[in-house]
Image (tube, rainbow, N blue to C red):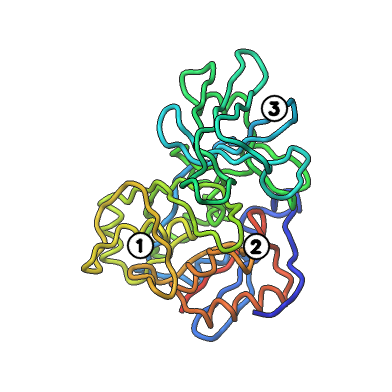
Amino acid sequence: MTTATVHEATEPAEARGLARDGVRLLVHAGERVEHTVFRDLGRHLGAGDLLVVNTSATLPAAVDGYRADGSPVTAHFATRLDEETWILELRHTDGTPGPVAGVRRFEAVRFPGTGCGMALLLDPYPHEHTPQRLWKARITVPHARVETFLADRGRPISYAHVRERWPLTAYQTIFARDEGSAEMPSAGRPFTHELVVDLITRGVTVAPIVLHTGVSSQEVGEPPLREWFAVPESTAHQVRRARRVIAVGTTVTRALESAVGPDGEIAAASGWTDLMLGPDRPARVVDGVISGLHAPEATHLLLLEAVVGRAAVRRAYDAALAEEYLWHEFGDSSLLLP
């Protein structure tokens, strides 16, 4: 992959004077690369194609609190394990990159406000031999549900490349209906209702899955963590009948491929997935991916390569770098076909 400067999207398309579907779209098909805008996606899809979308809604999963020594910290609520147990990542409130160091087992993080909440850190996650970045935590809040506490006290998770705080609506896709994602399933962000209608009139079918995303702040070389997903039978049936299956994002790709059995057939499925697609496990039912642009070292790239091949991903990313496409959740998009 060409070494070049990555241009980061620091704000939503709307703040740049664009509609959501006005961001750029890089289309890779065969060995050809075309540059267009997202609202023209329908020109590259057609009758018999199935577009699978993630209906998970983004939680306001970042909450400011204090460690026992009084130092401020921001807790990222990454994954819900049960009513009272969540996976947390502690970050610096001043935006310093990386997780907070020196966190210890049974440390308490307090969340100020009416009816103070608290997180008691139990164990490193997923096990004690992993870097102490993520923690299994027992959550005590003055609300019936932790999600209600987050709605009251939280804000969307963001990282240093986003210079301002944006409301939760900026981090929701038009497909969002099932709350549970720590971060936005961002591949779906450029879609508008008008674009979906255009796709349907062209004979494209749209089908849902759910995959609740965790935090995207993996350390280099760290595999993706377990995520909860559900593929309904209606979607599995449509996948089996489709001319081409186009996944809107790596989350959809992971969910669909997690529902594929040993015989290579997809069926309804739900639960936790730790599937990692790559050279040893190529995609079996997904034919193409709509995706934002990810950091070159991200495990997302291995997943894309599992669908369209390494050469295609390299060709597309080299073109995106050369044309100064915008990276990250508010950035430009790509349609990757073999």
Task: Examine the rendered structure and indicate whether residue 36 appears above or below residue 173.
Answer: below
Find residue 194 and report its horizontal and vertical position in percent: 53, 53
Q: Amino acid at mark 1?
A: Glu
Q: Is residue 282 left or right of residue 170?
A: left
Q: Amino acid at mark 2?
A: Asp
The front one of 111 and 197 is 111
Cα separation between marks 3 and 1: 40 Å
Cα separation between marks 2 and 3: 36 Å
Q: Which mark is residue 332?
A: 2
Query: Disc 3 vs disc 1: Cβ atoms closer than 8 Å?
Result: no
Quadrant showing the N terminus: bottom right
The first of marks 3 and 1 along the sequence is 3
Characterize the local packing of mark 3: few (<14), some (14-19) or many (20 or more) Cα atoms within 10 angstroms: some
**SS state under label 2:** loop
**SS state under label 1:** helix
Characterize the local packing of mark 1: few (<14), some (14-19) or many (20 or more) Cα atoms within 10 angstroms: many
The first of marks 2 and 3 along the sequence is 3
Find residue 41 and report its horizontal and vertical position in percent: 53, 66
Find residue 327 and report its horizontal and vertical position in percent: 68, 62
| Residue annotated with mark 1 | 257
| Residue annotated with mark 3 | 66
| Nearer mark to the viewer, of 2 and 1 | 1
| Nearer mark to the viewer, of 2 and 3 | 3
Characterize the local packing of mark 2: few (<14), some (14-19) or many (20 or more) Cα atoms within 10 angstroms: many
Q: Amino acid at mark 3?
A: Tyr
Find residue 80 and report its horizontal and vertical position in percent: 46, 36
Query: Disc 2 vs disc 3: Cβ atoms closer than 8 Å?
Result: no
State the residue lying farthest toward the bottom: 31
| Nearer mark to the viewer, of 3 and 1 | 3
**SS state under label 3:** strand
Residue drawn at (38%, 70%) of the image? 283
The front one of 304 and 324 is 304
